[in-house]
Image (cartoon, rainbow, N blue to C red):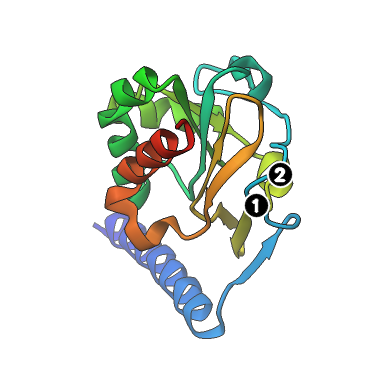
Amino acid sequence: MGREVEEYRMRLSRILLVVTVVAVCAVVGVSAFAGGNPLTAGATAPGFTLPSQDNTPVSLADYKGKWVVLYFYPKDQTPGCTVEAHNFQRDLEKFEAANAVILGVSLDTAQSHQSFCTKESLTFKLLADTEHKVIDAYGVPIKNFGIVKIALRQTFLIDPTGKIVKTWPNVDDDLRNHSTNVLAAIAAAGK
């Protein structure tokens, strides 16, 4: 019985530590920084190569001649990111019919992406930018919660020639309709 009480106290101590850290972050605030200047419509999309959920390298150049929906998101297996991914997956056939691919990018590892894709039945590519080189190149802000860093939710629509034609710097404002809005932008830009 004494060992069980001690284990319980240790677990409780850890929980209290986490709650305290979260509370301090909420009161003091968290720092946010961008790796560079935010890219805007008309800019040439920076090239990149990152590992996908199956650890194969994926390059922007692989998709020359296609529309690319490059979306940055905070964290695998979190509520908002799951909603966003499910909506892109729901509309995947429509994107394919519009000659478009979906590429999701976060600071998570390829292994984390694999677990997320398996759990949520996601079939498009999620890219691991653990060193935030692509996140910085596109000027996506990062929030720093001490030991945990997340990229903010932003999307870039890249045309078949490699130019950024539209950006969504505040995806959280209309997360549930985001996939539909991106499809509409592809249709409008393609005319």
Give the percent coordinates (x, y) of residue 147.
60, 58
Of the pair 90 and 115, the residue shown nearer to us = 90
Q: CA distance from mark 1 to mark 2?
A: 6 Å
Residue at (48, 37) in percent of width and height? 189
Could you classify mark 2 by the number of other residues whose Cα lies within 10 Å: few (under 14), some (14-19), or many (20 or more)? few
Of the pair 152 and 164, the residue shown nearer to us = 164
Tag 1–tag 2 contact (CB < 8 Å):
yes
Residue at (59, 14) in percent of width and height? 56
- Residue placed farthest to the front in the image? 191
Q: Dividing the picture into quarters, in which one does residue 76 lie?
A: top left
> Residue flagged by tag 1: what amino acid is it?
Thr
**Res 40 label:** 1
Side (left or right) of 112 relative to 180: right
Give the percent coordinates (x, y) of residue 43.
71, 44
Q: Which residue is mark 2?
A: 43
User: Is 6 above or below relative to 31?
Assistant: above
Give the percent coordinates (x, y) of residue 68.
53, 29
Side (left or right) of 140 relative to 73: right
